[in-house]
Amino acid sequence: MAINWFKYSAPTTFYGLAGKLIPWFAFSAALLFVIGLYIGFAVAPVDAQQGEFYRIIFIHVPASILSMFLYLVMAGYAALGLIFNTRLSAMMATAIAPTGALFAFISLWTGALWGKPMWGAWWVWDARLTSELILLFLYLGFIALHASIDDPRRADRASALLAIVGSVNVPIIYFSVKWWNTLHQGSTIKYTGTSMHVAMQQAMFIVLLACWLYAIAVVLARVRSIILERERNTVWINELPEVRS
Amino acid sequence: MLGLLALVIRRDLVLAMRRRADILTTLIFFVMVVSLFPLGVGPEMEMLRRMAAGVLWVAALLSSMLSLGRLFSADYQDGTLEQMMLAPQSLSMLVLGKMTAHWMVSGLPLVLMAPVLGLQFDMPAQALGILIVGLLLGTPVLSMIGAIGAALTLGLRGGGVLLSLLVLPLCIPVLIFGTGAVEAITAGLSVASHLSLLGALLVLALVFTPWVTAQALRISME
């Protein structure tokens, strides 16, 4: 049987599929959050050097990983939309941006909370902190550009181009910031060779998975509202039970 | 090809010369921002000498943002841009010409002005020389990256502020290597790596940005 790979690339079919998938992702995300945070806060042992403070790592690291990963996913969808001119890809890129920005913000915020007891300062001009901040700026630029163009087609294409230019620039920015930092001063934090405790690894991995599932659930929910908004004049939208009532 | 480039550059330069006030505003803004720093942080020469390169670079970055809005807007408003896009010649080449002309009227004056301002900060001659070389390599990159933003925000409400929001994060590497070179020479290290990286950025920008800007213009004009 030939599978039609492109069936769900149309907003009409994807809208229903997303609606069915959201509860699954949302529920498993919530479950994994509870498990991961329980292991992280109750089971994992106290760190030898950092005491109880290190436990913020279970939120900080997954948020940082996702903020970077989501930018790539967003740029990927943007490129798809620009190259193949598919409406849904552009909608996905638009839907991912706020979640990515949120994770970048959480990563900076928890980083600041962690930095205060560890380094004695809320903010250190460390290479990773700085590049995370720039990543947040890139997300905000994408959102701002999309929001200020009224024509949705032009908004999609213009912000897609910006996302692609940004993703080409991200490695350049990352390395330049890294070299800038090492030239100014020695790296503030160094990872010592000690391996992490198994429970810590498990907790971090489970929370990472939870964040990922959460991101998928939220993006799907957001893309559904974008579909509703963009296609409001079509027949199929007006025949949906939730729109009729 | 080169004839087309020269034609576009000459046209834009003539247009800019007819409105000299625009060029002067950018330059005066640059001088003013740089002069504000000693007033803000205090007149200790030791500190100013250390800050000089960073202050000059950030001021150059901000003033180049200021003039970017004009890169395409006049041509967009009177319909010239539309004609340029219909022309059989390559749009990337036309864009490259416009970028070059923009740099000559907005970037080059800053580079020429920088040594005078550097002296105000008591920069040593050696550091001053490297600063100029860095600015010469870096300011064209600012114009070229900025052109992408200018094309994307063409004809939008509040385009100026939005433009800075989009372009400034992308310009960070230029700032880092430009100031890094001056810092290296002050510390007695080799500046070759910083200047090579700036040169690499310039070459990369030269290859890719005209094409990307042309695509952005197509998106904005359709």
Image (cartoon, coloured by chain):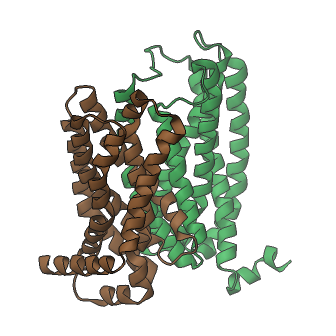
Chain colours: A green, B brown
Q: How far from the left and from the top, in percent, is residue A160?
A: 47, 66
Q: Is residue B124 above or below residue B113?
A: above
Q: Position of residue B51 (x, y in %)?
A: 40, 35
Q: Quadrant of residue B180?
A: top left
Farthest-out residue, left: B2
Question: Is there any visible trace of residue A234 in the rendered image?
Answer: yes
Q: Is residue B112 above or below residue B220?
A: above
Residue at 31 percent of width and 33 percent of height: B183
Which residue is depicted at the point 67% across and 67% down?
A: A224
Q: Give the image location of residue B107, x and y in percent.
A: 31, 60
- Identify which residue is drawn at 39% across, 41% down: B54
Residue A2 picture quarter: bottom left
* Labels in figure, total: 0
User: Which of these two is toward me, B74 or B222?
Assistant: B74
Q: Position of residue B208 (x, y in %)?
A: 28, 63
Residue at the spot x=22%, y=37% of the render?
Answer: B125
Question: Quick one: which residue is furthest to the top in this view?
Answer: A48
User: Visible in this render: residue A5?
Assistant: no
The quadrant of the image that shows the C terminus of chain A is: bottom right
